[in-house]
Structure formats: structure tokens, C-alpha cells
Image: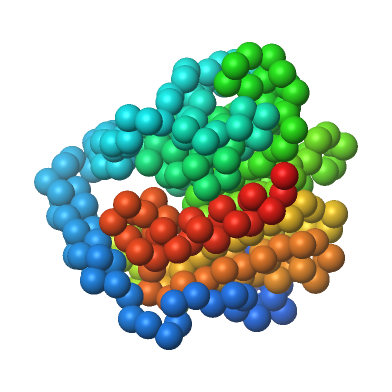
Amino acid sequence: MTEFLIGVVAVLAVLGLFQIFFLRGPDLRAFDGPVGQRHGVDRPPSAEHGALVSSLGGISVALKSVPRRQHLAWLRGYMDTAFPLDDPSVRIIPADAGGVPGEWVLAPNADPERRLLYIHGGAWTMGSPTSHRRLTAKFSEVADAAVLAIDYRLMPEHPRMAGIEDCRTAWRWMTDHGPEGAAPARAMFVAGDSAGGNLTLSLIAWLRDQGLRAPDAAVALSPATDATLGSPSLKGNLETDPMLGPLFKALARIPRTVLLWGGWAQNRRRPCHPVVSPVFGDLSGLPPVLVQASEAEMLFDDARRYVNKAVAAGSPATLQTWPHMVHVWQLFHPDLPEGREALREIGAFLRARP
């Protein structure tokens, strides 16, 4: 019996060490400060933001009446109809980006030689070019660029790497294809929100490593950068994040060890592998990167740690933060003053690179 207990303890010790050194990755606490460029700290959130927060509670209420096995389908449908584009001056042109479906989104001022690849968010499981047209149209306007929004493959129907490969394929295609056909690009950008921000930051590191054309600049909105779930704000901001908090509160009760093993099995990559956790990669030699995040959201420390590590590695990365805002508040820009303010900052950042 004693030998059996010793064996069990030894196995548990090995598994614990394996988790610490193989799944969790290096300690990132050295990159917890500074915060970055803070906006809106001298004023309370707008009344429009308060109304938005109140409306988000309806999502959780509606989900309670939907069978659990239908949650994903319901959320996908909700995302595709919640943010309609009401501007008839914006042109939408279907595109096949080297086998990756998508669409060109062109504001009236869009220069077809300035191109921006937009990678939508949605926890790698939902979202589409349709769900983000309101935002991609605004990116086209503020960047004076033609936006290529891609419909990359989603989980769980496809493995995580399938979506990553779609982003790489679309970028290579966009270098010499525009909305008017085959033509070289004068300036190229990439942007994404949440899971799309993760894919954006993964893509720019891969382009550097492959020696391929790098973007002139990249933008990540509220990006997920650490799949090891090590960011303090994941729990610290659980109650202050009105969008992600209610959706992921149940996950917060599951031991991190279980989530790490599950993530490894699901993604077929270690949670700390840079392809799924950009913050653990080499962040030197990157193009200019602008990251925006809310100080109240669960992914705040994912954003802060990524930018601080990139700056320490010598890359031109900038973090802009707003207090109180919901996750990816830029999506609500037609009604939200803080969303319009954030997009003006993005426009100035992108237009500075002709």
C-alpha cells in the first residue's frame, strides 16, 4: 500500500511539473506595467455606454431559454444580425482570397492600393464578415483603405490551425490582389478584435519568421494573447466585464489545470505555444502595433503584457486603454462616443503610414 501511494504521489508530481513547465509557459508578471496611454480617465462613461451595458444582460437571459446544445448556433445567429450596416455608400464585393471566402468592404474614400486584412472576433467559434461589417466599413473609412474581411474556418467544425492557415493564405493573396483584380498593394495592414486580435498578432510574427511582406502596421482590439489563462484580469475583472463575464463565469470555476489540458487536446498545441499564445513568442522585429483594451475587461492583462513585452523587445508597440468600457466597444461606434474616439485614434495611426 505504501509503495502504491508513493507511486501515485510521484505521478502527480510529474504531472504537476509537466503542467508548470510544458503547458503554462514562462512567468509574465514582469510585464504587468505600465498601463499605456489612458483615455477617458477624467470623465465618467457616457450615458450611451450605460445603456449598452444594460442591454447586454438580455443576451444571458435569452440564452437561458435555449437548450445548451444549441447555444453556439444561437450565438452565431445573434452575432450575424446584431450589428447591421446601414450605410448604402459602402460597397461590399465578394472575394475568394486564395480559397478563403471573404468580402471587400470599401468606404467611398477607400484607396484600392491601400489594403487592410480584417480578422473578426468570436472566440474562434463564431463571427463572420457579416457580423463585423459595421466595424470593417469604419476601418475602411478611417484608414482610407480597402478592407478584406475573411470568413476563416471556425472551431469546433475545424481545428484551431485551420483558421490560422486561412489568415496566412489570405494575407499572401492580398499582397497582389485588390478589389479591382490582380494588382500590387502600395500599403498593407492587418487588424482584428478579440480572437481576431489573437490571430492578427500570431500572423505578424509568422510573417517575420517566414521573411514575407510585413504589414505597414497592425491593430489589435482587446486581443486574447495568452491561452494559458495566466492573466490576472481573467478573474480580477470577471465582475466588471459585462460582456465576457456572464459568458465565461462558469469556466472560471473550473480548475486551471483542467482547462490547460483541455486546451492542449482541443488545439493540438501547447497552450503556451506562440502560434496560439502570441505573448510567449519572440516579439522583436515586429511592425508598428496598436493595441486597444478596456481596463475593465477580462482580457486587459493579455493586452498589457503583450505590449509591454513587445516594447521591451524593441518593437514599436502602443497600448491605448479606456476605463469602464465593454469588450471590443469599438463595434458599437455608431451609438458610443468612446467607440468613435477609439476609431479616430486608429485612423490617425494607420493614416500615418502612407
Query: In the image as oriented, which residue stretches furthest toward the right?
Result: 211
Residue drawn 77% across the image and 68% down it? 311
Residue drawn 17% across the image and 55% down it? 58
* Whole-percent x, y for residue 13 in the image: 67, 68
Q: Can I make out residue 190 in this image? A: yes
The figure's colour scheme reads rainbow
293 in relation to 215, above or below: below
310 in relation to 262, above or below: below
Q: Can I make out residue 8 in this image? A: no
* Whole-percent x, y for residue 36 in the image: 62, 75
Using the rendered view, name the quadrant where residue 49 is placed: bottom left
Asked whether, in this view, residue 123 is left or right of residue 29, the answer is left
Query: In the image as oriented, which residue stretches furthest toward the left?
Result: 65
* Whole-percent x, y for residue 62 in the image: 15, 49
Q: 349 or 168, which lies in front?
A: 349
Residue drawn 12% across the image and 46% down it? 65
Position of the N terminus, as image quadrant, is bottom right
Position of the C terminus, as image quadrant, is top right
173 in relation to 354, above or below: above
Q: 67 or 195, which lies in front?
A: 195
Query: In the image as oriented, which residue stretches furthest toward the bottom?
Result: 42
Residue drawn 54% across the image and 77% down it? 38
Query: In the image as oriented, which residue stretches furthest toward the front?
Result: 109
134 in relation to 29, above or below: above
Q: 246 or 306, which lies in front?
A: 306
Total labels: the figure holds: 0
Q: 246 or 33, which lies in front?
A: 33
* Whole-percent x, y for residue 166 in the image: 61, 28
